[in-house]
Amino acid sequence: MRYLQFTLFIVFSLLMTMGVLANDPKNDKPMSHEEMMEVYTKLATPGEPHKLFASLTGSWTTKTKEWMDPQKPAVESTGSVDIKLLLGGRFLQQEITGSMHGKPYSGIWTVAYDNLLKQYVSTWIDTMSTQIFIMNGTANADGKTITLTGQHAEVGGGYMAHRAIWKIVDGNAQEFIMYGTHHGGDEMKMLEVIYTRK
């Protein structure tokens, strides 16, 4: 069963890649199977963004500030993060534990650099919801400041828009700042997480 699922995934991935390449005006002629496999192999090979991911693996401590109301002081807490690479260095996973709104909290943040789309894609799951929160975005010139955007459904209807800035200061320090916009209102700073390597 797993072999069948894996085979279907590979076929689907190839078809998606072929569709994108077929629509590329630079491609004047159809690609052979061998050429297509060569392109697919290159797309599946970790590159510079993935090397940056690798420099972050290990254990970290966090200091977090969160704001529910911008007119009130931030709620501060501490936590820990275990960072590892998945699937041959292609994906970064951060497993986070701490507290949120005064309650124990854990979450998993997975980040990818999609070689085909040339952008970062992330998913977030945690113990405070049953949603999968997805964001995507790009990095600045040196690749160390990544800006991600996304949205999630809100109680009562509608969506909250998010903008996050993940800054990789160096191999021992990171910063993650998230802003949110309720129902088209003013953007507010919601979260600030400072990472320090243990």
Image: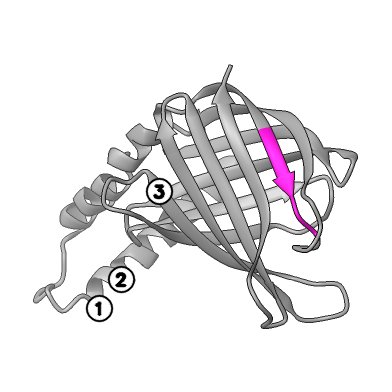
Between 11 and 165, the one nearer to me in the picture? 165
How far apart marks 2 and 1 lie (CA) works out to: 5 Å
Residue type beneath disc 3: Thr
Q: Are the residues tagged 1 and 3 within 8 Å (C-beta)? A: no
Q: Are the residues tagged 3 and 2 within 8 Å (C-beta)? A: no
Tag 1, which secondary structure? loop
What range is drawn magenta here? 63-68
Residue drawn 63% across the image and 41% down it: 193
Disc 3 target residue? 145
Mark 3: few/some/many CA within 10 Å (<14, 14-19, 20+): some
Tag on residue 20?
A: 2
Q: Is residue 111 left or right of residue 62?
A: left
How far apart marks 3 and 2 lie (CA) works out to: 28 Å
Mark 1: few/some/many CA within 10 Å (<14, 14-19, 20+): few
- Residue 90, position in %: x, y? 42, 38
Residue 67 falls inside the magenta stretch? yes
- Residue 14, position in %: x, y? 36, 59
Q: Is residue 194 left or right of residue 98?
A: left
Residue type beneath disc 1: Asn
Tag on residue 23?
A: 1
In the displayed structure, 170 sits above or below 75; it is above
